[in-house]
Image (cartoon, helix red, strand yellow):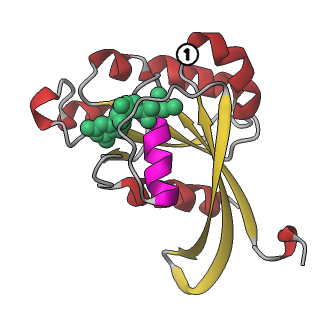
Amino acid sequence: APMSTDYDYLVKLLALGDSGVGKTSFLGQYTDEVFQSKFVSTVGIDFREKRVIYRAPNNSARAHRVHLQLWDTAGQERFRSLTTAFFRDAMGFLLMFDVTNEDSFTHIRSWLEQLRTHAATETPDVVLCGNKADLATRRKVTEVRAREFAKQHGMPYFETSAASGHNVAHCVEKLLELVMTRM
Ligand code: GDP
Ligand code: MG
């Protein structure tokens, strides 16, 4: 049977954030439950897929088969023109910074601007992830600060670790819920 008949929804999500924050590791952890500690800089754009069953919180009896496409961007400026084309197609955004890297948190504002400029809607569904939460001794951005920022911008916030898997699935499921609520 053709692929298009065996799922109810195709959901495209895009991971955004500075280079090195852990986007590729996070998506690898989510789709394959593996973590590679070697740093491989993503060139341009790439995607991974996963099938999930979605149940709305208020109607858990109804199960939807979702085909998730997780688009992975390169954070480098030089690829920005390439990746902006993918903003339009995405239904939700995983916006990520590294809790041990102050600059990556500061840059979230400009990623939000990029998003508002290039996304298909002016109020896209976004979840903020403070990744590398396992590196407690190297932390620069407190959870309180990140949570406050997320609240001001109307985004759910998760502290995640692509290394341990902490909150990784949770974060994607929350974004999926936001996207599915709109459909
Ligand atoms: P990307 O450029 O955003 O795709 O970042 P990568 O996924 O390539 O990760 C950059 C580096 O950070 C790699 O060396 C990863 O192993 C490491 N890394 C990613 N996520 C975590 C995490 O949650 N905890 C720790 N300790 N290291 C991480
Ligand atoms: Mg990458």
User: Residue 29 at what x, y percent from top left?
Assistant: 43, 53
> Would residue 74 be seen by someone viewing this image from the given angle?
yes
Indicate whether 178 appears above or below 14.
Answer: below
Q: Which of 99 and 121 is in front in this view?
A: 99
Q: Give the range drawn in magenta.
A: 21-32
Query: To which quarter of the image does residue 77 belong?
Result: top right
- Circle 1: element type: loop
Residue 28, magenta (yes or no): yes
Q: Which of 119 and 7 is in front in this view?
A: 7
Residue under the point 66% across and 44% down? 47
Q: Residues within 10 Å of mark 1 (few under 14, many from 20)?
A: some
User: Residue 176 at what x, y percent from top left?
Assistant: 56, 59
Question: The disc labelled 1 sits on which kind of residue?
Answer: Gln
Q: Can you identify the residue that label 1 sits on? A: 76
Chief secondary structure of the magenta portion = helix
User: Residue 36 at what x, y percent from top left?
Assistant: 40, 43
Indicate whether 33 appears above or below 26.
Answer: below
Query: To which quarter of the image does residue 138 belong?
Result: top left
Residue under the point 61% across and 56% down? 179
Q: Is residue 2 rendered to the left or right of residue 59?
A: right
Q: Is residue 44 rendered to the left or right of residue 38?
A: right
Instruction: For the N terminus, give its image quadrant.
Output: bottom right
Q: Which residue lies furthest to the front in this view?
A: 38
Q: Nearer the viewer, residue 172 or 21?
A: 21
Instruction: For the C terminus, give its image quadrant.
Output: bottom right
Residue under the point 61% across and 27% down? 115
Q: Is residue 75 rendered to the left or right of residue 147?
A: right
Residue under the point 27% across and 18% down? 102
User: Residue 15 at what x, y percent from top left?
Assistant: 55, 38
Q: Nearer the viewer, residue 151 or 74?
A: 74
> Would residue 152 be seen by someone viewing this image from the given angle?
no
